[in-house]
Amino acid sequence: AFSSPNVVGLFFVEDGIPDYRPLWQFIKEDRRVVAFDFTAPESGLSTVMYGDSEGLRMAVEHCAARGHKRIAYIGPAGSVGQPNELRMAGFRLGVANAGLDPAACPIHLVRPNETRALAREILSKPAHERPTAFAGFMDYYLLEVIKSGWDLDVKCPQDIACSPTIHDG
């Protein structure tokens, strides 16, 4: 797709692309590229970044304002750097801003294929011990929490709340 002479510009969403050389060549040819959630300013790449930290902060504060005191974050294990580090920092900041006990607001990092098992383990705890709200790295993790809840008769939003990253307020 990068090599097509008919392409004047494109929107680029990074998804683990193993070889960026075609992208860099596309930029060298003075074609217009706007990347989402991926930065390389030294290459001349224009970028739109999500509000990863701010979005999670807002999600936690939203839940806390509605009475939730035990909020958990679920995100990917083994993810280094942006956006996971930014989202976890926003989660921690939201917990602090809301005056919540950090010990009652754990961060769980899990491989995607193990998310449902972790959620099931968490939701199997008595209601007074488990989180009442979940903030997630992305919707996938929260959907696994909701599906686990169905198996255990723990319903969203009646028993738990799930708040995805808020990107633009």
Image (cartoon, rainbow, N blue to C red):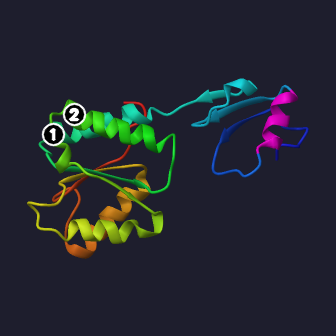
| Residue 109 x, y percent position in the rendering | 39, 56
151 vs 16: above or below: below
| Residue 92 x, y percent position in the rendering | 29, 38
121 vs 168: above or below: below
Residue at the image point whose x is 30% and y is 63% from the top: 146
User: In screen coordinates, is 25 left or right of 69?
Assistant: right
Residue indicated by mark 2: 96
Magenta span: predominant SS is helix
Residue at the image point whose x is 46% and y is 69% from the top: 113
101 vs 153: above or below: above
Q: Quadrant of residue 168?
A: top left
Proximity of marks 2 and 1: CB atoms separated by less than 8 Å: yes
Residue bounds of the magenta highlight: 20-29
Q: Nearer the viewer, residue 41 or 133?
A: 41
Q: Quadrant of the C terminus?
A: top left
As drawn, the residue found furthest toward the right would be: 5
Total labels drawn: 2
Reply yes or no: does residue 25 show up in magenta. yes
Residue at the image point whose x is 18% and y is 33% from the top: 98
Q: Nearer the viewer, residue 55 or 88?
A: 88
143 vs 28: above or below: below
Residue indicated by mark 1: 100
Q: Quadrant of residue 2?
A: top right
Q: Quadrant of residue 126?
A: bottom left
User: In screen coordinates, is 42 left or right of 90?
Assistant: right
Q: Amino acid at mark 2?
A: Ala
Reply yes or no: does residue 57 show up in magenta. no
User: In screen coordinates, is 86 left or right of 108?
Assistant: right
Residue at the image point whose x is 60% and y is 36% from the top: 36
